[in-house]
Image (cartoon, rainbow, N blue to C red):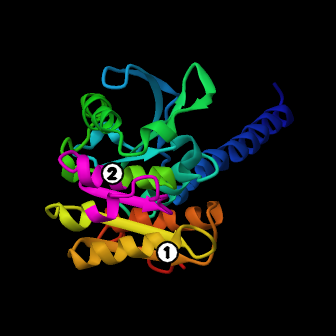
Amino acid sequence: MNRIARMFVASLVIVLFGIAQPSFAGANLANAKGGEKGTLSDNRVIESDHLGYKLQYRVYLPPDHDSRSELPVIYLTDGQWYIEPGSLPRLLDKMIGAGKIKPVVAVFLDNRDPENLKNNRRNREFLCNRDYIKFVSEELAGEIDRTYNTRANRDGRTILGLSFGGLNSACFGLYGHESFRGIAMQSPALHPVDSLLSDFRDAPKRDLKIFLSTGTVRDNEDRTRQFKRVLKKRGYELLYKEVPFGHDWNNWKPLLDDILRYFYAVKDPIPRARGSP
């Protein structure tokens, strides 16, 4: 090979190496800036002895789950809605990556029949159905705690729901409090269980941490405000929010970061690098 040919080959190697190197560096930089993302499983099916039928759910795991322990768990009824349009897995990635909240496992419980998605069982499951409460508290929570690195007690568990799902969370406060300390309710449709407010007023006070919210545009707000007054009078640990929206995701989605901070905030957020915005 003559001198000119050798110089051409050497130049080509340098050019190719120079092109290749930034692509690796760029990938590392993107990971460093954006942080690692969690994982969302496919649907998993569990058969309930308490209910006598199958249900399905998906699980979000935070980054580095396998190297962590004692992770808190948030259970979401109507979980398919909290995935889309609620975009909760993306919000978890963002808030965990930014150091705003602790790493948390999320269980998205789909209340539709896995074999016939048109059959949504929420109306029979969410109205203080004791068998449903036992299913979540014993069967599902037991499966999650056996499979993942969770804090396997009531202090590590929160249940969140909207509308009838919010009513369901309130029912867990009364009848599932031995398994769940965190009770989160968005626009709870309280009217199907007439005794719920009086039950919270008259029953022994539970050790609960409660989030409660309502819209102010035809969103059952009068009943929810009554509920807030009962909870405050009983001295419950409570964060209450009202927003100027109706019974829809314009109301619920913007409050998800408030809910996550309330239950899982990091007291000392990860400091930003000097000079960063």
Pick the residue in front: 102 or 251.
251
173 drawn magenta: yes
Give the Cα distance between marks 2 and 1: 19 Å
Q: Residue at x 24, y 47 (%)?
A: 175
Q: Residue at x 59, y 52 (%)?
A: 87
Q: Residue at x 61, y 63 (%)?
A: 247
Number of numbered labels in the structure image: 2
Tell me the kind of residue under disc 2: Cys
Question: Can you give x and y, in whole percent of width and height, for residue 166 in the image?
Answer: 44, 55
Q: Is 178 on the left or on the right of 58, as rendered?
A: left
The stretch of residues the image draws in magenta is: 170-198
Which callout, 2 or 1, points to the residue nearer the camera? 1
Question: Can you give x and y, in whole percent of width and height, for residue 248 in the image?
Answer: 64, 61
Pick the residue in front: 16 or 46.
46
Residue 1, by quadrant, is top right
Cβ atoms under marks 2 and 1 closer than 8 Å: no
Query: Residue 118 got which mark?
Result: none
Query: Residue 171 got which mark?
Result: 2
Q: Is residue 275 above or below residue 78?
A: below
Question: Can you give x and y, in whole percent of width and height, for residue 89 in the image?
Answer: 52, 49
Question: Can you give x and y, in whole percent of width and height, for residue 168 in the image?
Answer: 40, 49
| Residue topped by disc 1 | 222
Q: Residue at x 68, y 42 (%)?
A: 20
